[in-house]
Amino acid sequence: MAGPNTTHIPNLSRRRPQPSGDEEATSQLKLGDMDATPALSVAECKVLLDQLASRQGARPTSQSDVYVKTREYVDVFARFKDPKTVTQVDAITAGLLGRGLGHYERAQLATLCCDTPDEARTLIPSLETKLSDDELQDILNDISKLRDFS
């Protein structure tokens, strides 16, 4: 129990806005306002951050904590490190946009590097009715050939 000599520290954090409830990545992809927004794979994000760092020099003077954490994340989780390979994966997945897949699904396929259509559909449920098993397996095989296992 607080005594007379204790001070109350005010809450300085902002309230998080309540989720609108219309975003979900299930069998029916609902991304709300972000539905038509282009999405990047983790590898594409790594390439962009690498380009930004090369423009600013080896050590930019004003690195925010979010920037540093994002760089660490993409360095660890990007499946494709070479910009040429990232471009090749992008070319493979870009053709899917005209076949009913959205930007989010394209980015997820490029990021997750699934081995089988079942795995891809489990991780990206909205793929269920958009591609046949054979089509999806061909795409996954093409992406897998480019992976660097080092």
Image (cartoon, rainbow, N blue to C red):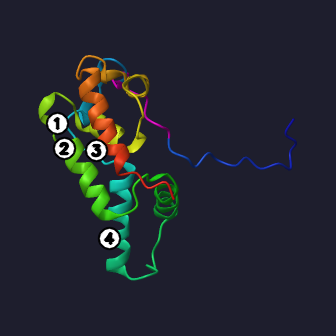
Mark earlier in primary sequence (3, 4): 3
How far is disc 2 from disc 1 in space, using C-alphas? 6 Å
Q: Quadrant of the N terminus?
A: top right
Q: Range of the magenta residues?
A: 15-24
**Given the image, on which type of amino acid does mark 4 rest?**
Gln
Q: Secondary structure at mark 1?
A: helix
Judge by depth and name the residue closer to the eye, 7 or 16: 16
Label 1 near label 4: C-beta < 8 Å? no
**Given the image, on which type of amino acid does mark 3 rest?**
Ala
**Given the image, on which type of amino acid does mark 2 rest?**
Ala
Q: Which mark is residue 94?
A: 2
- Prevailing SS of the magenta stretch: loop
Query: In this orientation, does residue 9 appear?
Result: yes
**Given the image, on which type of amino acid does mark 1 rest?**
Leu
Residue at figure coordinates x 27%, y 38% from the top left = 106
How far is disc 4 from disc 1 in space, using C-alphas? 25 Å
Label 1 near label 2: C-beta < 8 Å? yes
User: Is residue 20 inside the magenta stretch?
Assistant: yes
Q: Secondary structure at mark 2?
A: helix
Q: Which residue is mark 3?
A: 39
How packed mark 2 is, by other alpha carbons closer than 10 Å (few <14, some 14-19, many 20 or more), is some
**Residue that extends furthest to the left in the rendered view of this protein:** 98
**Residue that extends furthest to the bottom in the rendered view of this protein:** 57
